[in-house]
Amino acid sequence: MATQVVAQVTVIQALLIGAYYLFKGCRFGYTLGVTTIFTPLPAALWVGIVLGNVPLAMTVGASLQLMYLGIIAPGGNLPQDSALAALIACTVVIKSNIPVEAAVSLAIPIGLLGAQLMNVERIINAAWVHMADKYAEKGNTTGLYLAGLVYPSLVKIPLYLLPVALAVYYGTTYVQGLVNAIPAPLMHGLTVVGGMLPALGFAIVVSVIGRKYLLPYFIAGFFLVKYGGLGIMPLAIFGGIIAYLHILFTYKKDGEGRVNASA
């Protein structure tokens, strides 16, 4: 494989990308955080803005978004950290010029690592709980404030910001060296697998839907997107109207005011 020139990430860029992950570590709940602002697309947008290549970053983010569509957090535990995967993968693609599909396949172990970082944070935070108990017994309100808010917030900096900043600052060089050492057939295999992963994520969503009376909507939507020639916004509005009409005509309230499906 031919060697390619690697564009170095600056310190400011690395810190800004790490700051996004630090912001993610502050937690904003499941609906606002996990399923919205800390998914691959918003993370990719941030990387694209910081590194000055939004179109390429969004291409990577869109592939990862499809791949992680079926990811849920049972019991509050995420099996994959899609935001970290997007931050690293987008940076590598923009700065190391590797194929998008190959970066998608490389993002999987990164997402697994990010999930373990959250578990490490929980283990560390257990120490602050015991510390707060001791402060509470003594009536030390300042100690309670430190153990309940300040210390858990400070530990996020070395746990979230610094590792990501160092990874994107030094990682592109090492990743490019690794990519140059990968034989062309193996890189082609990674590219093929990476191209299949978004379809797998979408298939997981379809299996989660799992209701026969909803499948016609899915099939109709697929053909409308594929052959309708409409833009994303008209399709989104049309889909919202169809969803509202479905709920309006298929759901009804029982005598106690609870909503039940008639299908």
Image (cartoon, helix red, strand yellow):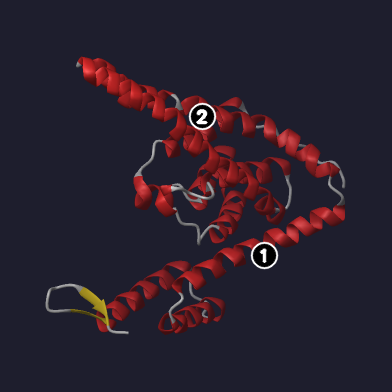
N-terminal of the two: label 2 or label 1?
Answer: 2
Tell me if mark 2 has few (under 14), some (14-19) or many (20+) residues whose alpha carbon lies within 10 angstroms of its own: some
Q: Position of residue 12 (x, y in %)?
A: 56, 27
Which residue is located at x 30 percent, y 23 percent?
Answer: 132
Q: CA distance from mark 2 to mark 1?
A: 32 Å
Q: Are marks 2 and 1 in contact (CB under 8 Å)?
A: no
Counting from the top left corner in percent of width and height, residue 258 is at: 18, 72
Tell me: residue 70, above or below residue 47: below
Secondary structure under badge 1?
helix
Residue at the location (86% across, 56% down)? 185
Residue identified by numbered label 1: 196
| Residue at screen point 51% across, 43% down | 46
Q: Report if residue 28 is visible in the image.
A: yes
Badge 1: few (under 14), some or many (20 or more) residues near its Cα, within 10 Å? some
Quadrant of residue 101 within the rendered picture: bottom right
Residue sticking out furthest to the left: 255
Asked if residue 36 shows in the view, the reply is no
Q: Where in the figure is residue 7, as x and y percent of width and height?
A: 71, 35
Tell me: residue 42, above or below residue 189: above
Residue in the foreground of this view, choosing between 115 and 227: 115
Q: How many marks?
A: 2
Q: Nearer the viewer, mark 2 or mark 1?
A: 2
Q: Which mark is residue 10?
A: none
81 is higher (above) or lower (below) than 7: below
Type of the residue with mark 2: Leu
Please state the horizontal and vertical placement of residue 120, each as a whole percent of the image: 50, 33
Q: Give the amino acid at mark 1.
A: Met
Q: Secondary structure at mark 2?
A: helix
Image disc number at residue 159: 2
Q: Is 11 on the left or on the right of 36, as rendered? A: right
Answer with the quarter of the image where residue 131 lies.
Answer: top left
Q: Quadrant of the C terminus?
A: bottom left
